[in-house]
Image (tube, grey):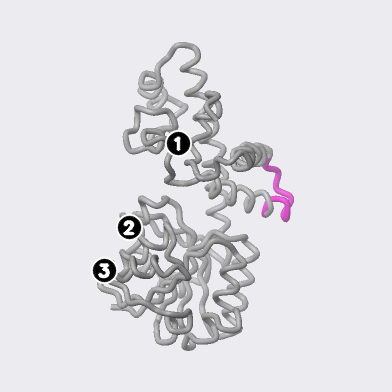
Amino acid sequence: MTKIAFIGLGNMGSGMCANLAKAGHDVHAFDLNADAVETAVAAGANAAATVGEAVSDVDVVVSMLPAGKHVHQVYFGDDGVTAHAKSGTLFLDCSTIAVEEARDAAAKAAQAGFSYMDAPVSGGVAAAEAGSLTFMVGGGKDGFEKAKPILDVMGKNVFHAGDPGNGQVAKIANNMLLGISMIGTCEAFNLAEKLGLDAQTFYDISSTASGQCWSMTSYCPAPGPVPAAPSNRDYQPGFAVAMMLKDLRLAMGAGDDVGADTPLGNHAQQIYAKLDEDGFGDIDFSGVMRRLKGEL
């Protein structure tokens, strides 16, 4: 049993926290949303009234927060994690934030006597609840070895991506590819349908041919072929347009910083930005299919 503080009990963090508690760890949960804390307690965690109370006597802090500004405030604010945690506490931040924000956080943590690992995730809400996330971890090797048993409880794939910030590099590059491939998959299904080929037949052919990709076989944007896909529940998210847009913006910003040419990533960002601007930020990112069909 490890004493763990879990900070950030949103759609992703709630399931992750519950899995740590179910595994027998002593989890102290904090969120600004009291209802989210109550849910964590029902899953076996202990309620903490403040960040300081959550982290004051734990071995590991796990966080899942909306953006880099929240990560830095929670960890390094006047009444944040570093002000209350005991020296040597391991920090595992599973938020998706900018690469430089993660590297800055690792440097600040080290100066304060802590080990900070950026450990963003892939897999969405269903995987968070099932404990089958993929973790991409940046930071020192020793920190990774300490983190892995904790991350293994919440995920089925845990990768050490290398130096601080490299977890975020892996995450934004992966999600840029996902955003691009989903749009392409939607276009292919839409074209096939308009030319008279039904979705199931196209799926049966393309999923075993050179067009096969995760966006097709695991998350098919056309209703029918993959029963568990959001397309079969009116595009209720799994992974919302707004979240994909956030990740694409992080990828484009990082690319600009290093002069990486990402024309398709930029085009994907524009497509998701228009959906978000038009009020569809809360549908699943595979809902691009509905826009192509003229339904949005």
Mark 2 or 3 closer to N-term?
Answer: 3
Q: Position of residue 243 (x, y in %)?
A: 53, 50
- Magenta residues span 254-262
Quarter of the N terminus within the rendering: bottom left
47 over 193 or under it: above or below: below
Mark 2: amino acid: Gly
Q: Give the CA separation, mark 2 to mark 3.
A: 11 Å
191 over 43 or under it: above or below: above
Q: Residue at x 67, y 49 (%)?
A: 252
Q: Position of residue 67 (x, y in %)?
A: 58, 62
Mark 1: amino acid: Ser
Nearest the eye: 79 or 62: 79
Q: Which residue is mark 3?
A: 23
Q: Position of residue 63 (x, y in %)?
A: 47, 69
213 over 249 or under it: above or below: above
Farthest residue, direction front: 35
Q: Is residue 18 magenta?
A: no
Contact, CB < 8 Å: mark 1 with mark 2? no
Q: Give the CA separation, mark 1 to mark 2.
A: 21 Å
Q: Position of residue 118 (x, y in %)?
A: 52, 66
Q: Which residue is mark 1?
A: 215
Mark 1 residue crowding within 10 angstroms, few (<14) / some (14–19) / many (20+) = many
Mark 1 or 2 closer to N-term?
Answer: 2
Q: Residue at x 61, y 38 (%)?
A: 278
Badge 3 element:
loop
Mark 3: amino acid: Ala
Q: Residue at x 54, y 54 (%)?
A: 170
In the picture, the disc for residue 131 is: 2
